[in-house]
Amino acid sequence: MNLSVHRRATALAALTALAVSGLAGTTASATPPAAPSAPSGALAAPDIPVANVKQHLTDLQSIATANGGNRAHGRTGYKASIDFVKAKLDAAGYTTTVTQFTYNGTTGYNLIADWPGGDPNQIVMAGSHLDSVSSGAGINDNGSGSAAVLEIALAVARANYQPNKHLRFGWWGAEELGLIGSNRYVASLPTAERAKISGYLNFDMIGSPNPGYFVYDDDPTIEQTFKDYFAGIGVPTEIETEGDGRSDHASFKNAGIPVGGLFTGASRVKTSAQVQKWGGTAAAFDRCYHSSCDNISNINDTALDRNSDAAAHAVWTLSGATTPPTGPVFENAADVSIPDNGAAVTSTVTVSGVAGNAPATLKVGVDIIHTWRGDLVVDLVAPDGSVYNLKPFSSGDSADNVQTTYTVNASTEVANGAWKLRVQDKAAQDTGYINNFKLTF
Ligand code: TRP
Ligand code: ZN
Ligand code: CA
């Protein structure tokens, strides 16, 4: 490196200052971590009674049977389905709105249900398409999602859940004709209203008779919330790949709204590896997809139960907190000197008592005293060894010290364990030390 007089002078001045103030070389032990506190605003979702979800499916089957065997767009069975869901929501205290649209020369309907209260500028929305294809009753596709969303809405009312965010539920028309109802709904929202939706959760086919457990690969926070639920009950999941954009979440995603969802599989065939993982047979996830046998017998109750509970978990969790939780703080104030142009050194913070994964907004407090911070590469190393670069080598940056708080999406990392701040000085002349390393969960 090309050493300048300025650089040398800066280094000497800083080292003198350190010696005088007596900060250098201190070897205080790590301060004990603050007692873990419960995450703010997080109330556990209730168990969703699968018998209630099943009863809604039985009712949707009866509606189809009484209306020529289907609940398709433009047929009487569709409007009867809307009326059925709306009546339950009205009785539970929801503010419901039915909007009409025209497609293929016939009238379609969306149903929106708002739960009073919560921050109107932060809306968590869950939805499902209520229409079937014309060849059958559409009990898995998509009575299953529609019945689960209905029962979750009713569970919110039973619990009188008052989350910080506003809750809204939606049932879409004419999905089977190309996501028509959800597209019309999103198109009807002014830009300012779209921006208020912090997340849209989609449930389309969640009771397939030969089920897989698929989570949409979309917004990372929503995806992780679902995965956390399934991890907690010991059910492995896979990323949904049978058709990204093949359901109503695409309407929201195209408008820039964060989305996520669950799916148990349609006509694709379960692989032998998936049979090993989930049981069932190496046949279609739903052999009755879009056919007349998609009736009340075409449901796996276990899949319906697990997905209903996972959906409720996400609705509760994602609406519960308005601000990233400021949970427990763990800190290491011991000084660690950083050898000039030398090997990496670390300061360790051992996290305990924090359930589950680290947050998507893990705060990493870094306090490094150094006379030319451009020399430094700074990383956060998770307990499993995953590396998050906080600051790259930036040789021209001659300023002193790295004293800042970084936000790291650490949501794929288990919280508990030994986290390291790793610092390497990669250029000669200037030196310093780690003064403090702090993690806020
Ligand atoms: N209703 C969807 C359709 O008919 C079903 C579907 C297929 C789906 N693949 C999907 C839903 C993937 C969600 C995700 O196309
Ligand atoms: Zn569907
Ligand atoms: Ca140096």
Image (cartoon, rainbow, N blue to C red):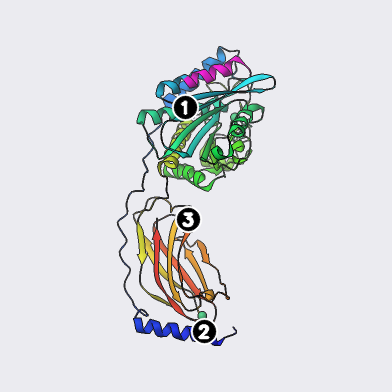
**Range covered by the magenta-colored residues:** 74-86
Q: Main secondary structure of the magenta part?
A: helix
Q: Position of residue 122 (x, y in %)?
A: 47, 41
Q: Position of residue 344 (x, y in %)?
A: 48, 74
Give the amino acid at mark 1: Leu
State the quadrant of the C terminus: bottom left
Q: Which residue is mark 1?
A: 150
Q: Position of residue 75 (x, y in %)?
A: 62, 16
Asked if the magenta segment contains residue 329, the reply would be no
Q: Nearer the viewer, residue 161 or 55?
A: 161
Q: Are marks 2 and 1 in contact (CB under 8 Å)?
A: no
Q: Position of residue 352 (x, y in %)?
A: 35, 57
Query: Could you classify mark 3 by the number of other residues whose Cα lies within 10 Å: few (under 14), some (14-19), or many (20 or more)?
Result: some
Ligand 1 within 8 Å of the CB at mark 3:
no
Q: Nearest to the eye among marks 2 and 1: give it.
A: 2
Q: Which residue is mark 3?
A: 410
Give the amino acid at mark 3: Ala
Q: Nearer the viewer, residue 261 or 392?
A: 392
Ligand 3 within 8 Å of the CB at mark 2:
yes
Classify mark 3: helix, strand or loop.
loop
Q: Nearer the viewer, residue 265 or 378?
A: 378
The residues tagged by marks 2 and 1 sit, at their Cα atoms, a distance apart of 67 Å
Residue 208 visible at all: no
Residue 388 visible at all: yes
Residue most extreme to the right: 104
Asked if the magenta segment contains residue 81, the reply would be yes
Q: Quadrant of residue 183?
A: top right
Query: Could you classify mark 1 by the number of other residues whose Cα lies within 10 Å: few (under 14), some (14-19), or many (20 or more)?
Result: many
Which label was assigned to residue 287? none
